[in-house]
């Protein structure tokens, strides 16, 4: 059984105007016997020689399954790295479409399967490749930097791809070189990076339907109730929420803040799928979801991504049994997109090497 969720989201057209579009998600019901379904999925992963690469926002059963079977649960930067470097010839990506595409772009020789190919992202939907190309053509003097949450065709038009883990460092690096930036698609993340780095950034007008719902005033009231709590915010959230944060960062950075923090209580402003891993890694700490308009206020106000929710044990088993839902990225789009993703991976690897005292092997532009 599936539940269909429909909602509106903002997008920018080629003329730069904001308009409203419509999207939907079909969320499968969990199987009755989850333990048996997990065991079956583990058996199928082994039989196929496949590895499961899951995002922190997907169902907890899938996160556990990934870790129990030698896969990974991580943010989109680490998912890309893990999939590229793992020996398995079949990657099963539990997340949203751009994550599967990124895996295929980096490993074209591998089979990349996803539980549901319709699992997308409002940032990706809100940045159609043709409109984006027209926007870039109007600003040829700017370096094009796109967030991971975009289609392969948009990445193919970009100079750099970034994730929320490395966006500040990469834009800061380009700014130090005197480059002007064209940024897409998340306006909140773009504004945050612009404020932090001082870079000259022209922003596409996209938003994440989940993070866009966090409310500044209600967060302030919640903090007054819990003055001892540390506020953790993902930078896709609106300014009024980011301004109240004690920690602003990627999903990995927010998890680290809970694990290493000395406080007992945390208010978390990101998709609530992350709480599963936070609870596992920091048992005993109190985690409070940051306020949105509230469950039922609109279909996007539950702080959980409807597209991430399309990943379930049931459809994972189906694709492992049938080999359906293989991701394809046609050439030359794939090769063009690969360049901007690898530029990011080279940059972050060089940073890591410098931090550990090794010789950096950075070949990025
Ligand atoms: S949580 Fe937001 S940014 Fe992440 S996949 Fe869903 S819509 Fe996209």
Image: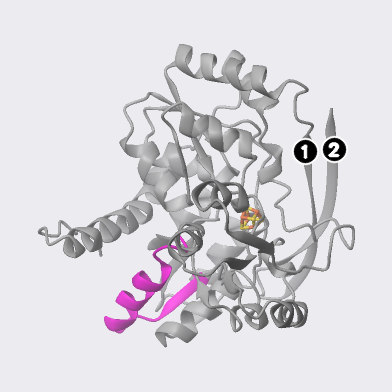
Quarter of the image holding residue 205? Answer: bottom right
Q: Nearer the viewer, residue 214 or 247?
A: 247
Residue 110, image x, y percentages = 40, 27
- Disc 1: residue Cβ within 8 A of ligand 1's nearest atom: no
Furthest residue in direction right, as rendered = 296
Q: Which residues are magenta?
A: 163-183
The percent position of residue 178, horizontal first and vertical second, equals 30, 84
Asked if the residue at label 2 sits under 8 Å from ligand 1, the reply is no
Residue 121 locus on image (x, y percent): 65, 52
| Residue drawn at x 35%, y 70% as measured from the top left | 170
Quick one: SS at disc 2? strand
Confirm or deny contact between disc 2 and disc 1 (CB under 8 A): yes
Mark 2, residue position: 3
- Picture disc at residue 27: 1
State yes or no: residue 204 in magenta. no
Labels 2 and 1: the sequence-earlier one: 2
Q: In screen coordinates, is 96 left or right of 329?
A: right
In the rendered view, would you say 254 is above or below 195? above
Relative to 264, say whether 180 is above or below.
below
């Amino acid at each position: 059984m599936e539940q269909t969720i429909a909602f509106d989201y903002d997008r920018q057209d080629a003329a730069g105007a904001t308009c409203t579009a419509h999207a939907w998600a079909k969320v499968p019901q969990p199987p009755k016997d989850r333990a048996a379904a997990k065991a079956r999925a583990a058996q199928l992963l082994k039989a196929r020689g496949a590895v499961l690469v899951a995002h922190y926002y997907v169902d907890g059963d899938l996160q556990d399954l990934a870790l129990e079977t030698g896969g990974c649960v991580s943010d989109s930067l680490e998912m890309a790295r893990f999939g590229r470097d793992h020996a398995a010839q079949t990657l099963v990506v539990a997340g949203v479409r751009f994550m599967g595409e990124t895996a295929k772009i980096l490993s074209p020789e591998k089979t990349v399967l996803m539980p549901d190919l319709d699992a997308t992202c409002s940032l990706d939907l809100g940045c159609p490749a043709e409109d984006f190309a027209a926007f870039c053509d109007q600003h040829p003097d700017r370096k094009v930097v796109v967030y991971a949450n975009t289609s392969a065709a948009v990445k193919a038009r970009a100079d750099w791809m970034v994730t929320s883990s490395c966006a500040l460092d990469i834009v800061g690096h380009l700014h130090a070189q005197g480059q002007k930036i064209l940024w897409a698609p998340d306006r909140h993340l773009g504004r945050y990076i612009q404020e932090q780095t001082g870079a000259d950034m022209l922003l596409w007008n996209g938003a994440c339907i989940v993070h866009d719902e966090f409310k500044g005033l209600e967060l302030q009231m919640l903090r007054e109730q819990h003055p001892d709590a540390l506020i953790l915010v993902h930078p896709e959230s609106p300014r009024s929420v980011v301004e109240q944060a004690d920690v602003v960062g990627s999903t990995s950075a927010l998890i680290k803040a809970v694990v290493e923090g000395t406080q007992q209580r945390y208010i978390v402003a990101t998709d609530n799928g992350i709480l599963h891993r936070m609870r596992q890694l920091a048992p005993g700490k109190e985690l409070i979801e940051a306020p949105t308009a509230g469950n039922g206020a609109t279909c996007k106000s539950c702080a959980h991504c409807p597209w991430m929710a399309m990943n379930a044990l049931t459809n994972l088993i189906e694709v492992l049994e049938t080999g359906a839902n293989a991701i394809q990225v046609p050439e030359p789009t794939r090769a063009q997109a690969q360049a901007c993703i690898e530029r990011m991976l080279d940059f972050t690897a060089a940073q890591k090497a410098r931090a550990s005292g090794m010789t950096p092997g950075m070949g990025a532009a």
